[in-house]
Amino acid sequence: DGGITQSPKYLFRKEGQNVTLSCEQNLNHDAMYWYRQDPGQGLRLIYYSQIVNDFQKGDIAEGYSVSREKKESFPLTVTSAQKNPTAFYLCASSIARDTSGNTIYFGEGSWLTVV
Amino acid sequence: DQQVKQNSPSLSVQEGRISILNCDYTNSMFDYFLWYKKYPAEGPTFLISISSIKDKNEDGRFTVFLNKSAKHLSLHIVPSQPGDSAVYFCAASQNYGGSQGNLIFGKGTKLSVKP
């Protein structure tokens, strides 16, 4: 079945450590996104990528980094510079970013807790 | 400044009755609107969408209404079922002819449908 797979589902990180969240999609979507959800907040965009080897900062990119070496994969690294990394992280994809009427599909999410 | 607002953090409805979830937006350039449903610790799932050229879109028990002059949209669920209990996110996007397309999310409304 086609879909978006995020791993791990739960992750604990010590302060000062970098951690990478995996996101893979087999939907043949060009665009991929990372969102973050905090209690009482909507989904906020961290980074997005419209095409392989290209990515752009979203609204809250500070303390995060991404890569897009393959169409199917868009890993997110939460660096030690991210001040409040504990959150629920959602990866998403869509056919093409620039198409009006485009629907975004989400993965199951990854819980990151800093201990 | 929030561009997409869901002013009711929660809503409680009796099973079988109508649920009405509201969403307001401030950016008149938004031309596509979506509703997502989210269960705890899962990724949001796409529910229904509407383009700005329409004022109503219906899919089974779910209907979305768009009032462009009021910059307001609403999601109607009828009849409501206990399985509809979830957080509902309103989202909006605009297309600058290729340069945009990012979804802006509201903070969500938690719907509880009581048996």
Image (spheres, rainbow, N blue to C red):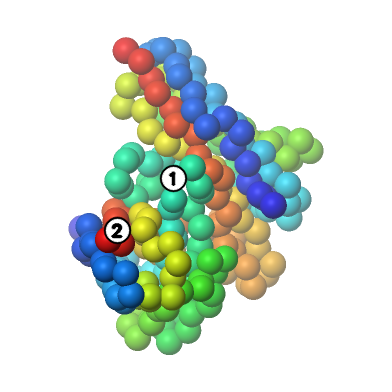
Sequence order check: which comes first, mark 2 or mark 1? 1
Q: Indicate which disc residue A39 carries.
A: 1
Q: Are marks 2 and 1 in contact (CB under 8 Å)?
A: no
Q: Indicate which disc residue B100 carries.
A: none
Q: In the image, B36: left or right of B32? A: left
Q: Hey, which residue is sitting farthest right in the picture?
A: B69
Which residue is at the front of the view, B8 or B54? B8
The secondary structure type at the circle numbered 1 is loop
Q: Quadrant of the C terminus of chain B?
A: top left
Residue type at mark 1 is Pro
Which residue lies at the image location 34% right of the left edge and 50% below the top edge? B43
* Residue linked to disc 2: A113
Q: Is residue B25 above or below residue A101?
A: above
Which residue is at the front of the view, B51 or B15? B15
Quadrant assignment, res B66:
top right
Q: Percent x, y for residue B95?
A: 65, 63
Q: Is residue B22 visible?
A: yes
Question: Are dots 2 and 1 on a single chain?
Answer: yes
Q: Chain of mark 2?
A: A
Q: Is residue B24 above or below residue B78?
A: below
Distance Cα–Cα, label 2 vs label 1: 14 Å
Which residue lies at the image location 32% right of the left edge and 69% below the top edge? A15
Q: Percent x, y for residue A65?
A: 42, 78
